[in-house]
Each structure stands twice: as C-alpha cells, then as structure tokens.
Amino acid sequence: MSHPTGLIIKAQSGFFTVQPDDGGELVVCRIRGRLKQDRRRSNIAAVGDRVTFTLNADGTGQIESVAERQSALSRTRTGPEQRNLQTEQEQVLVANPDQVIFVFSVRNPGFSPRKLDRFLVVAEMNHLPAIICANKVDLVDPAEAREMFRIYEAIGYPVLHTSTLTGEGVDELRELLRGRISVLAGSSGVGKSSLLNAVQEGLGLRVKEVSDATGKGLHTTRHVELIPLDGGGYVADTPGIRSLALFDLEPGELDAYYREIAPLVAQCAFSDCTHTHEPDCAVRAAVEDGRISYERYDSYLRLREEQQELTDKKY
Ligand code: GDP
Ligand code: ZN
C-alpha cells in the first residue's frame, strides 16, 4: 500500500506539520529514524518539502520519505576556521519555492538599491526567480517610481508597482502569488503586511505572527511557515532572508550573481579578473559604453569589498 503524500508547511524543533494532498486535516509528524542518516549535508526536511507519511493511532504521523528538492532557499553554515572540514552544511530555509518577491517602498522608508542588490545575489545563488515589488507608489510621481527601478527592468527582473492606498498592482500581485510557493522579503515598514492584507483579508496578520514569534528569545529554533492562500499556493515570510548575510560567498564568485556581469566574465583577459583594475576587462568595458549600469557596477565593487573583509576576518 502506498503512503499518503503531503507538503510540509511548518517546521519547528523536530516537528513537521504536513498538509495532506487529499485535503485532510493537518498532521504533526516526526521524522522516521532511519531517514536521519541521509542528507547529512542538508536538512532532512524543511518547509516546502513534499513527503510521504504514515499515521499513528494517536493522530500524529511519521514522515517516511522526502521527495528530491527542485529548488531551495538556503544558506550554508560553515564553521569559521574549518571551511574544508565536514562542518559545512546547507541550511534550507524554504524548499521548492517558485519565486522570491523582494518588497521595497519608494518612500518612507526610501528605496535602497544596495539592499536590493544583496537580495538579488541571494536569489541568483539559489537559482530562484526574483520579482521586485515597488510599494507605496502613491507617494511619488509615477515617472519617478519607474526611473528608480529602470535598471532592474533592463536586466530582466520583473518590477511590480503597488500601492495599498490606491490598490494599484494588488490584483497583479494576487495573480503572481496564486498557485505558487512564494517567499516574501523586505525590511519592516515597507508595507509587506499591508500588501498581503490587500491580497487576502487577514493574510498579513498571519504572516506577521509567524515572523514575530521567530524573533523572540535566544532559544527559538528557526521557524518558517507556509501560509496558505485562498486561491491556492503559499506565502512564506522568512525572517531568515532578512538577515541572510552573504557569509559564504567568496569575493571571486560574486560576479556570477550579477546577471548582467556574469556573461561577460569569460571575455576578460584574465580568468581571475576582479573587474577592478585589470587590463582588457570586458566588464569595465561594458560599464564604459553603458551596457552595464554604473550603479550596479559600483554596487558589485562595494559588495565585493565587504565580502573580502569578511573572508579576511574568517581566516
Ligand atoms: P511591514 O512592516 O513591511 O509589514 O509594513 P506594514 O504593512 O506594517 O506598513 C508600514 C506602514 O506603511 C504602515 O503605516 C502602512 O499603513 C504604510 N503603508 C503600507 N502600504 C502603503 C502604501 O502603499 N502607500 C502608503 N502611502 N503607505 C503604505
Ligand atoms: Zn574583468
């Protein structure tokens, strides 16, 4: 007999809440012991994983198998001095997300391109489609809002303009979320809760409860939850991504995660070109003739410098 299947929508301290595919009641599961020997380099199970499970007599369950992940939003935990030892472990925040939505407000608080660039690096590192949501567009001139995000549209990131005040973009956002697992990220105050409430009554509140609970206390295990949408699909607001320092990124690999820089790297004269001073650098040439925006190049340089400092500290 085959086991029932489901989706992990909550993971906390070794307990996994599974939404059965047949639409039945949520089942709180533990992981079958023998599974724990696998996947040492990554969480055995995470929110967003598809599983098979069995029911115990008392209504709790056991996860019997975890389907292979199609994608993940994860960070790698590395012991500071032991990079090459077996301490490196992938920590999956959300398994199988379909997209990451980065929310910024155009004003109050003002848009921070540096922060967006960091977020985009995280998305690229995880091979996840990124969508930019520019909220509070009611506070600025439409042309000004477009100009703010123009370079991102030019390199192919979808930019959605929204206002919870006028309702602009809310239908589009609802459509984007429908039927997908979306991770929402953005600083507090940019309007994430308001946007989610506009998409679906009470949704912002539920997501906020999850992230507030996570912030409390030193001993709180990372707590991510998928909040179901009426129209199908789930939203995760992971506090994890907010603090997602790029602490495992080697300065030399950063260029791979700036999507307009990456394709040029192979044309640089030196294979280890840092694109800062080397002769015959295809990246700098592209900045000079305007194919790469100066802002993004500058952001690359700064982030590279930051990563270099972090790396220097580590060793
Ligand atoms: P969160 O911390 O990202 O969840 O942000 P909130 O949803 O709590 O919103 C922060 C503040 O921004 C609140 O005072 C909201 O009323 C306000 N706000 C949210 N969306 C908009 C918007 O589209 N336009 C304007 N003008 N204010 C907004
Ligand atoms: Zn170069």
Image: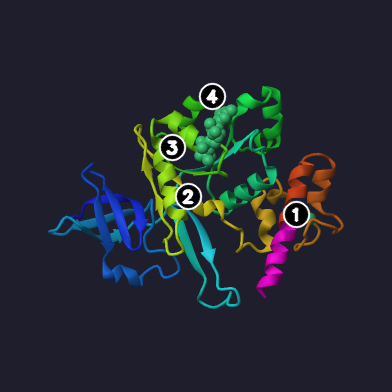
Q: CA distance from mark 2 to mark 4?
A: 25 Å
Disc 4 under 8 Å from ligand 1? The reply is: yes
Residue 7 screen position, x and y as percent: 32, 49
Sequence-first tag of 3 and 2: 3
Give the residue at mark 4. 165
In terms of sequence position, does the residue under pointer 3 or pointer 1 come before the other?
3
Ligand 1 occupies quarter: top right
Along the horizontal axis of the image, is 17 left or right of 209?
Answer: left
Q: In what element is the residue under mark 1?
A: helix
* Contact (Cβ within 8 Å) of mark 1 with mark 4: no
Say whether disc 2 or disc 4 marks the residue closer to the N-terminus. 4
Q: In this picture, which residue range is highlighted in magenta?
A: 304-315
SS at mark 3 in the image? helix
The yes-or-no answer for disc 2 within 8 Å of ligand 1 is no
* Structural distance between the alpha carbons of marks 1 and 4: 35 Å
Report the amino acid beneath label 3. Answer: Gly
| Residue bearing mark 2 | 238
Residue sitting at x 67%, y 26%: 140
Extreme residue in the left direction: 57
Rendered position, 149 above or below 182: above
> Which label was assigned to residue 204?
3
Residue 310 counted in the magenta span? yes
In the image, is residue 8 above or below residue 173?
Answer: below
Q: 167 or 155, which is in the foreground?
A: 167
What whole-number distance in Å separates the C-alpha atoms at marks 4 and 3? 15 Å
Q: Position of residue 18 (x, y in %)?
A: 28, 51
Q: Which mark is residue 302?
A: 1
Q: Nearer the viewer, mark 2 or mark 4?
A: 4
Residue 217 left/right relative to 127: left
Within 10 Å of disc 3 (Cα), the crowding (few <14, some 14-19, many 20+) is many
